[in-house]
Image (cartoon, grey):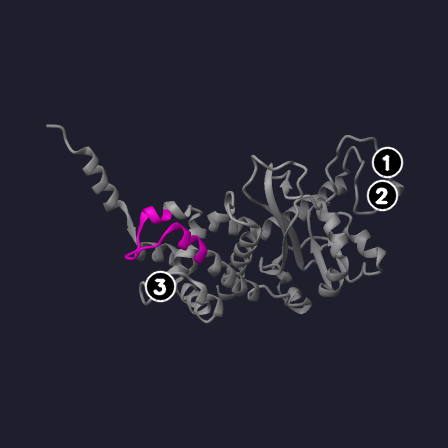
Amino acid sequence: MPANTGGLRNREEEAARMNYAAARLYVENAVGSSLLNEWKDFVLADPRAKKLWGKEQVSSFERRMVTMAVYKDLTGDGYQKILSQLELGFKMTVKCYLRNTKVIRKILATWGEQQIKNEGVAKWNEYKKLFPKKRNLGSMNLIMDSTDFKLSGKASMSRKDPRWSYKLNAPGQRFQVVCDARGKVQRLWGGYSPKIYDGDWIDIMKEELAASFKGAHIVADTHYETANATFKKIGKQKQVVFYTPYAKPRGRKPKTTESLAPNQSRGLRVLTNEQKEWNKRIQHIRARVESPFGLIKNKWKGLKGTFYENEDQHNYLVFLAIGVHNYRIEHS
């Protein structure tokens, strides 16, 4: 008589399913039990939490949904997959899980925004001693960086679309940060079109940056090499100063060196030894402060791969993730 392999497989699958407590433990290991409880209280205190579906099922439903929403973004798994893996002790459809997660993400993004504060030049200078000391870079107190996060829709989207990222070879959104020497984010911008070059973004934002970051001495990469010239045009070159590496040679014929700004090298075929040394100093400083974008992509798997929901939800998750990043720095 043949073995009932189908029944055995079903029993094995049932035994392999996790319960809610296992999901909660996963989240607590990732962000801490105290922070998870803080989020639960934060969500329950928000009037938007009244829009959650399924509250009548169990008394602790809202608090459980906060855990489940965060679990989804930490693992990066789909809603259907999670529901098939977890034994919740109550019924929940994919539609309900999706809708509730969207509501909770939006609320927690508000919490994330509260953790991102421009602390001012006195605070930047207090921590700049954490940067390695380098010649001609003693005034440096901030780092600026950008990254692209991937969105869905690659197969159907034209490369001419504003959302297309050539870095990702896929649709995406770009985000920009300014960090102090601890890596704590002082300001987060985004998401916006990945087609906006960082130097052009500085030109668009120059008035706001000059007003909000007076006294900033910012280390950045070659994409920001025109920043000092941009601030000079509006007479703010002493309020916000950028330190960028010389661009790598691109094989073009050399221009006359007289036409180049001291910190620019577009068109040079070969970098001088002095320029190479300057680039090493910049690289060393940037390497000492790990990019918050790299850290949050490793923690939040929902941001590491393709994000399949809309751009607003994408923004909410990035602000939450950066908020957690700052929270951990402040409370470590």
Residue linked to disc 3: 61
Between 97 and 260, the one lying in front of the other is: 97
Q: Hey, what amino acid is under mark 2?
A: Leu
Q: Residue at x 73, y 60 (%)?
A: 209
Can residue 139 be seen here? The reply is: no
Horizontal side, residue 166 vs residue 242: left or right: left
Residue lying farthest to the left in this orientation = 1
Q: How many marks?
A: 3
User: What mark, if any, has residue 260 been given in the picture?
Assistant: 2
Circles 2 and 1: CB atoms closer than 8 Å: yes
Q: Hey, what amino acid is under mark 1?
A: Lys
Q: CA distance from mark 2 to mark 1?
A: 8 Å
Specify the quadrant of the image occupied by residue 269: top right
Q: Secondary structure at mark 3?
A: helix
Q: Residue at x 84, y 33 (%)?
A: 254
- Which stretch did the figure color magenta? 82-100
Q: CA distance from mark 1 to mark 3?
A: 67 Å
- Report the quarter where the N terminus lies: top left
Circles 3 and 2: CB atoms closer than 8 Å: no
Q: Hey, what amino acid is under mark 3?
A: Phe
User: What mark, if any, has residue 255 been given in the picture?
Assistant: 1
Q: Is residue 30 above or below residue 222?
A: below
Indicate which disc, 1 or 3, sits on the residue closer to the N terminus.
Answer: 3
Measuring from the top left, give residue 247's x and y in whole percent: 74, 40
Indicate which disc, 3 or 2, sits on the residue closer to the N terminus.
Answer: 3
Horizontal side, residue 264 vs residue 288: left or right: right
